[in-house]
Image (cartoon, rainbow, N blue to C red):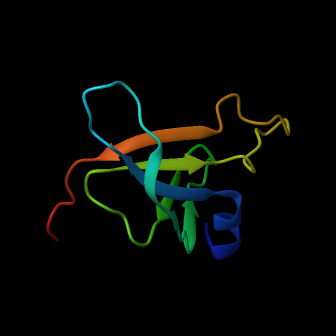
Amino acid sequence: MRLPEQARHYEMNSYTVLYQATYGSDEIQKQDLVIPTAIVTADGLSVRLTINNLRELFVHELMASGIRSQESEPRLHPHAYHTLNRIPDN
């Protein structure tokens, strides 16, 4: 099922950090990303998100706080992180 309203259950942002000799850095160049659509599979176990403005070499944080199980339980881990090293040419 392809529903723009399904996308409201997801939020996403991207950011990077300063690479330096000491460990740790604040998140910099943080940007909220737009998720215009979500395509949910018939069994409800997978979703394909369309995400605007992905950035190479940035950490992307996906928050799926609005997603519930079939028993209406919240997700155990509603946040996911991924560093996008390269965007392939289409």
Name the residue: 26% across, 51% down: 57
Figure check: 4 above or below 25: below
Name the residue: 47% across, 42% down: 26
Tell me which corner region of the image, top left, top right, bottom left or bottom right, holds residue 68. Answer: top right
Q: Please state, as top left, top right, bottom left or bottom right, where the N terminus lies in the image.
A: bottom right
> Residue 23, percent across and down?
36, 24
Figure check: 84 above or below 53: above
| Front in this rendered view, residue 47 or 30 | 30
Tell me which corner region of the image, top left, top right, bottom left or bottom right, holds residue 77. Answer: top right
Most extreme residue toward the top is 23
| Front in this rendered view, residue 54 or 9 | 54
Residue 67 horizontal side relative to residue 52, left or right: right
> Residue 70, percent across and down?
79, 40
Residue 31 horizontal side relative to residue 85, left or right: right
Tell me which corner region of the image, top left, top right, bottom left or bottom right, holds residue 35. Answer: bottom right
- In this rendering, the count of numbered labels is 0
> Residue 18, percent across and down?
32, 43
Most extreme residue toward the left is 89
| Front in this rendered view, residue 37 or 30 | 30
Name the residue: 72% across, 47% down: 67
Q: Please state, as top left, top right, bottom left or bottom right, where the C terminus lies in the image.
A: bottom left
Residue 74 horizontal side relative to residue 79, left or right: right
Name the residue: 54% across, 71% down: 34
